[in-house]
């Protein structure tokens, strides 16, 4: 794995950590929290697009209360079960 690939994976982890932090500060009904989470999800998408196709599939799951808040958001931010599959 190259330095750039490791950096993209670190970016994904940092975004996941930031989402958890944002959700501890407030509910997704708060526009600022909603926008912060949405932007971090976009960052995850951009980082994933930068990964090469030959990397194995990565599975990232939110396994705490932040997960259910994302799934219950209006509109829903992530799928029910809140498992975000990151594929290359």
Image (cartoon, grey):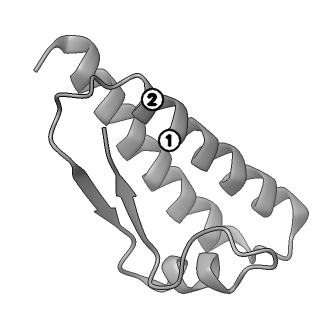
Q: If the image is split into quadrants, where does the N terminus sit? A: top left
| Res 10 label | none
Q: What residue does disc 1 label?
A: 44
Which residue is outermost to the top?
A: 3
Q: Where is residue 5 in the image (x, y as percent from the top left)?
A: 25, 21
Secondary structure state at the residue bearing disc 1 = helix
Q: What residue does disc 2 label?
A: 49
Q: Where is residue 87 in the image (x, y as percent from the top left)?
A: 32, 46
**Nearest-to-viewer mark from 1 and 2:** 2
- Nearest the eye: 52 or 73: 52
Q: Which residue is at 32% across, 26% downward?
A: 51
Name the N-terminal-most of marks 1 and 2.
1
Residue 3 lies, with reference to residue 67, above or below; the image says: above
Q: Do the residues labelled 1 and 2 touch (CB within 8 Å)?
A: no
Which residue is outermost to the front?
A: 53
Q: Which residue is at 89% across, 63% downward?
A: 31
> For this view, does 79 lie left or right of residue 75?
left
- Rendering quarter of residue 77: bottom right
Q: Where is residue 86 in the image (x, y as percent from the top left)?
A: 35, 50
């Amino acid at each position: 794995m190259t330095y750039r690939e490791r950096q993209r994976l670190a970016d994904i982890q940092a975004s996941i950590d930031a989402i958890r932090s944002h959700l501890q500060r407030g509910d997704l009904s708060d526009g600022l929290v909603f926008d912060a989470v949405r932007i971090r999800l976009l960052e995850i998408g951009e980082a994933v697009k930068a990964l090469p196709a030959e990397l194995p599939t990565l599975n990232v799951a939110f396994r705490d209360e932040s997960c259910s808040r994302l799934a219950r958001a209006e509109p829903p931010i992530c799928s029910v079960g809140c498992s975000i599959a990151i594929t290359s």
